[in-house]
Amino acid sequence: MKPFGNSGTNGTVAASNQGCLLIKYMLHKCYQLLGDKSKESVTVFILVSLYLEGTQMTDTVQNPFTVDYVDGVVILLDQAALPAKEEHIHCTNWQRVAKAIADLEVRGAPAIGVAAAFGMALAAETSTAVSGEDLLAELAEVGEALNATRPTAVNLAWALEVVLREAHQAPRERSSVVDAVVSCARRLHAEDLATCKAIGDNGAELLAGASNVITHCNAGALATVGYGTALGVIRSAQKTNPGLHVWVDETRPVLQGGRLTAFELGRDGIDCTVIVDGAAASVLRASDVGAAVVGADRIAANGDVANKIGTYGLAIAARHHGVPFYVAAPLSTIDPNTLSGQEIEIEQRPAAEVAQYRGAAITPESAQVYNPAFDVTPAELVDGIITEVGILRAPYDASIAAAFGN
């Protein structure tokens, strides 16, 4: 995925300068990440290099990530403004990060997990707490507030849990707690890049002979730190299958497919066609679709998948037409403590997302609105879960347990 953001120039740099820019930028990120912990810094550099391998970088390297933390500021690409404008939100307090997550200015399970981790880093660095114990108590409250913004996406709770655990493992001096939180958040940021690249490469074989693939919502670089999960699979497949065409569900009501997925694919030169969600079944019947690939916000221990509303319908249509249905997600999206999809809390979004368009009413005032953000696709409709450790197959309770080493 080409970097996001307006550099203030014509958006390109000479090819001879690209390597130097990338090396300088990523070395800076490693040094910024863990300071004198050279072993861990080298590890992170290798992880990020895995992501950069083979990607085309034709823009200036100012801020190539969906979410980043630079000089005490959480920087988020404003996804609510896309595709009309590429703007970045600069969050100087954790409350602004929480608002961005709740308002879908940053969205996608992995991306909001990293954003929340950076929110914790920001809270730690700006806290007025004097002691480490007081700071830990404050961070626990901040974590609860951030976790409440989007209840369905498990990566959010997972990232916050990891940050708080490492904070509690640090010496009780305030500075040590701050360092632990910031270092952990930066590591999660780097690991997400490598994880998505591994997911993409592991799933690419599934699309090796496909002429078409269909996807729903946006599970790309915009939903992660970079590269993406479902779109990561498509990106990796496209390297050896350059003629691959993507059918993109527009994804009502916020149009993450039409606005964001089509934006990403077009930016990368990958052929795509946007369709209304209701056309997916007809496309599956009439077109040579090799597979459906989607992301996930939470996967239960039995393989049930919570993802953007409309995913369940796509899975049913795919099964009816004999099209394999795959879910691409990191292990952090799998929640072993949620036994089935029936236990997953489904977020209800504001009625205005359905009842209005650009502030103008499109439904009668008397009409009620039901606007769940997600639905749950039963495990029996899922042909494989593509993760960073490989493709999990049914029975999912066994393959998921094996993936976690249980």
Image: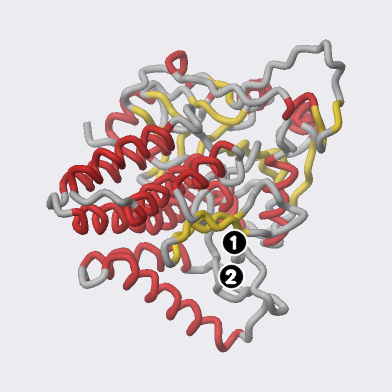
Picture coordinates of residue 231, whole percent (x, y): 58, 49
Name the residue located 25 percent from the left edge and 38 percent from the top edge: 137
Say what amino acid the circle numbered 1 marks: Met
Q: Residues within 10 Å of mark 1 (few under 14, many from 20)?
A: many
Which label was assigned to residue 249?
none
Say what amino acid the circle numbered 2 marks: Gln
Picture coordinates of residue 98, whole percent (x, y): 50, 41
Residue under label 1: 1
Circle 1 sits in a helix, a strand or a loop, which is it? Answer: loop
Residue 211 seen in the figure: no
Q: Residue furthest bottom?
A: 16
Query: 328 or 207, which lies in front?
Result: 328
Query: 39 or 135, which lies in front?
Result: 135
- Which mark sits nearer the N-terminus, 1 or 2? 1
Query: 397 or 156, which lies in front?
Result: 156
Name the residue located 44 percent from the left edge and 47 percent from the top edge: 94
Picture coordinates of residue 117, whole percent (x, y): 38, 48
Picture coordinates of residue 294, whole percent (x, y): 58, 37
152 to the left or right of 143: right
Name the residue located 55 percent from the left edge and 65 percent from the top edge: 64
Residue 146 seen in the figure: yes
**Above/below status of 21 relative to 175:** below
Q: Residues within 10 Å of mark 2 (few under 14, many from 20)?
A: few
Quadrant position of residue 11: bottom right
**Above/below status of 235 relative to 363:** below
**Above/below status of 38 relative to 17:** above
Residue under label 2: 56
Name the residue located 58 percent from the left edge and 32 percent from the top edge: 324
259 to the left or right of 195: right
